[in-house]
Image (cartoon, rainbow, N blue to C red):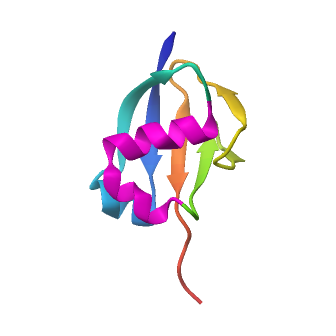
Amino acid sequence: MTAEVLVLYFAKSAELTGLKSETVSFQSQLTTLQLWQELEKRHPKLSAVREHVVLALRQQYVAVGDQQVILQEGDEVAVIPPLSGG
C-alpha cells in the first residue's frame, strides 16, 4: 500500500530542492532511512545534508535510521537540515 504525504522542506533543504513543499507517494510502511533515500532519489542534491538532517513525522522528530514508521494518507513529513548560525 502507498500513502500520499505532504513533504515540507525547510532552510537548506528548500534551497537544494527548489521547493517549499510537495506531495509524494511512499510505501505506507518503511524505515526512516528508506523514506530519506526516496527523497534523495527525487532530489539528489539533498545528499549534501544527509549526515545532519532530521525528519519530523506528524510534528514529531525522528532520526534517519532503522526506525519503522507507518505513513497514513495526508501525513506531513518535514525535512529539517542543520541550522547554521552562531
The overriding secondary structure of the stretch rendered in magenta is: helix
Point out the residue furthest to the bottom here.
86
| Direction from residue 22 to residue 51 in the image, left or right | right
Q: Quadrant of the C terminus?
A: bottom right
Q: Position of residue 15 (x, y in %)?
A: 32, 63
Please check the rendered image and state whether residue 9 is part of the magenta-colored stretch, yes or no. no
Residue 49 vs residue 43: left or right? right
Q: How many marks?
A: 0
Magenta region includes residue 34: yes
Residue beneath the point at 53% across and 36% down: 35
**Residue, x 55% and y 36% (percent of image)?**
34
Residue 33 vertical placement versus 20 (above, below): above
- What residue occupies the far top of the structure in this picture? 1
Q: Name the spot of residue 80 as percent of width and height, x first.
A: 54, 57
Residue, far left: 18
Q: Nearer the viewer, residue 15 or 58?
A: 15
**Residue at the (69%, 46%) spot, across then down:** 62
Q: Nearer the viewer, residue 43 or 84?
A: 43
Q: Which quadrant of the figure has residue 85?
A: bottom right
Query: Residue 24: x percent and y percent?
Result: 39, 30
- The magenta segment is 31-50
Percent position of residue 43, x then y: 32, 48
Q: Which residue lies at the image location 48% right of the left edge and 63% below the top edge?
A: 49
Query: In this image, 34 relative to 66: left or right?
Result: left
Q: Using the image as rendered, state which of residue 73 and residue 33 is in the foreground.
A: 33
